[in-house]
Image (cartoon, rainbow, N blue to C red):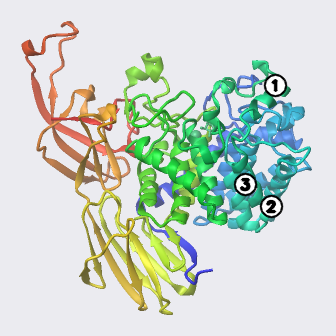
Amino acid sequence: MSNIELKKVEITSNFWNRYRKLIVDEVLPYQWQVMNDEANISIAEDPQNNGQDKKSHAIANLKIAAGDISGHHYGFPFQDTDVYKWLEAAAYSFSYTQNPDFKKITDEVVNLISKAQDSDGYLSTYFQIDAPERKFKRLQQSHELYSMGHYIEAGVAYFEQTGNEEALNIAKKMADCIDRNFGDENGKIPGYDGHPEIELALVRLFEVTNNDKYFKLAEYFINKRGTDPNFFQDQIAKDGESPQRDLIAGMRDFDLNYYLASEPIYKQKKPKGHAVRAVYLCTGMAKVARYNGNQSLLNVCNQFWNDIVKRQMYITGNIGQTATGEAFTYDYDLPNDTNYGETCASVGMVYFAKKMLDLQAKGEYADIIEKELFNGALSGMALDGKHFFYVNPLEANPDDSKNNPGKSHILTHRADWFGCACCPANLSRLITSLDQYLYTVTKDSILSHQFISNVATFENSIMINQTSNFPWNGNIHYSIVNPKKVKFRIGIRVPSWSADFSINVNGTVQKSRVIDGFIYFDVVDSTMSIDLTLDMEVKFMQSNNRVRSNFGKVAIQRGPLVYTAEEVDNGSKLWTQIIKKNAKVTVEFDSKLLGGVNVINIDSIKPILDDAESNLYHDMARSNILETTGILKLIPYYSWANRGNGEMSVWLNKQ
Ligand code: FUB
Ligand code: ZN
């Protein structure tokens, strides 16, 4: 154990504390209402056809399984996970907001989950209520281990934050049940879940219990994946070939790549299927590699990482280019107006990045955490905390969404809720646990990799106070207190978007070498102050020119924030706007807009629209282009769609 172990991080950033409070004040109570079917909203119909009232039923399912009420299961086979992720988000929120009334509710939910759990530890309400004979029999679709994995994460978090032993016991019973049922020994199931999640959860359980059995089980699931390409199909053959037997319609049609099960994971070079499955599995693999030092596993993580980040990620951090299978497609295919970019996938990318950073002290991982936090993941929630995006496009148009079936998944407003409600609480648990994403402690260094104001305390009374008005301003101040004069290094990230930076240590300007994205300073005295000034110039970003969709276009970025144009500020037909050559660019903070944002204004040209009656095509040489000049007003991407329905575009034409 290092003598600089992290003890506590208190976030003081105004930007993030607004969101952290929003989760406590609005999002969690709202989701509680939704899960109890008390919110006045209408969501998707039940995929199992057990009723048509278009509610969540997530709590009712647990009550039925607990024997408190009677009825059928309603919702997806993984409906329970809405409750678990909500509980996990609530657990983290107790680290910064004492909330005794709310805690009574969460304690009761833990009791309810305990009552719903079978005596052997099994818990998946769909199977308990409506299909007990099919437990673990159709793992391609059942999500049983995925669901229990989410509980295990929640149970561990709840135990850690509140000391509630029952929450942890439920998790252990579950993992024991899984351990009894899965493995290569006779009588056990030699397979794994269609949706990775259990792997990362088991490592989490291992970390808190120190019980090696859970770690070995995580390793087993990773090593087993894809070794028998017939595993899912053999199960389906036994459980019933008829499509009526499917737990989720259409899932049988996805090939094994979708499930990352086409071949052993060590042979896989890149994700080819479902984006969330891929990043959850990568997170699990990175966690396992951290403890067992398996270099081959780390190589797989590195390969997946490089492929995603260098060839398949949107500038906003969103991943998953197609709605078909919520999946990756192929390198450099990054269409902006048909993409998927599921909020969960961006959240999962943060999990993956953090685990990679814990393994390898490289700024590129922290860059992605930041990219997701300030763009792709954050856009998943409206400023009111009651509306959410599942799909995050980079270009949207209400006419397209309404009239083009290929774009019907692209919404231009955030929804009240979803039939498949995986995203909102995933984002909530990320934001309420944000304090866990700011530092990585190595043997002799503290890496401060996010510019999110905070006060962090470490062993030996070391304290780091980081202050700034980031992301609006790039002046970052560190004040370090080290009363025992413990020798250590602080590593501060220089973000890849900051071409220039300056550094001042104890009042003296210093030249510093950037090593893998970090600058390091020896801390030897009892106090030290560091000022980092980042390059907050507005950048005109271009894609690699292999990306067809963005050729000739630019996206505007300032600091970590990607900007976008909206119809409400710029009128419709955004695709006709052209940023002028040598355009004048201004940045102005508008405290009344969208909770307070820096707005970017850029000189632009806009052709006057052709007459609707004129020919669809005409000879360019004979056309008389009339244009107006104007100013394009841009807002941060995360804040779009908070002012009604309208067009939006991140990538813009440039003269
Ligand atoms: O399958 C469970 C969750 O539902 C996935 O993680 C999401 O992508 C959504 O498909
Ligand atoms: Zn989701």
Q: Is residue 632 above or below residue 296?
A: above
Q: Where's residue 253, x and y in %?
A: 65, 24
Identify the mark at residue 213; answer none if there is no mark.
Answer: 2
Amino acid at circle 2: Lys
Q: CA distance from mark 1 to mark 3?
A: 27 Å
Identify the mark at residue 237; answer none if there is no mark.
Answer: 1
User: Would residue 270 be found to the left or right of residue 556 on screen?
Assistant: right
Q: Is residue 404 above or below residue 390?
A: above
In the image, is the residue at mark 2 within 8 Å of ligand 1 by its beta carbon?
A: no
- Does the image show residue 624? yes
Q: Where's residue 172, x and y in %?
A: 81, 58
Q: Quadrant of ligand 2?
A: top right
Q: Residues within 10 Å of mark 3 (few under 14, many from 20)?
A: many
Q: Residue at x 44, y 66 (%)?
A: 449
**Mark 2 and 1 residues: CB-CB less than 8 Å, in contact?**
no
Q: Of marks 2 and 1, which one's residue comes earlier in the chain?
A: 2
Identify the mark at residue 192; answer none if there is no mark.
Answer: none
Q: CA distance from mark 2 to mark 1?
A: 31 Å
Amino acid at circle 1: Ala
Q: CA distance from mark 3 to mark 2?
A: 9 Å
For mark 1, give the secondary structure. helix
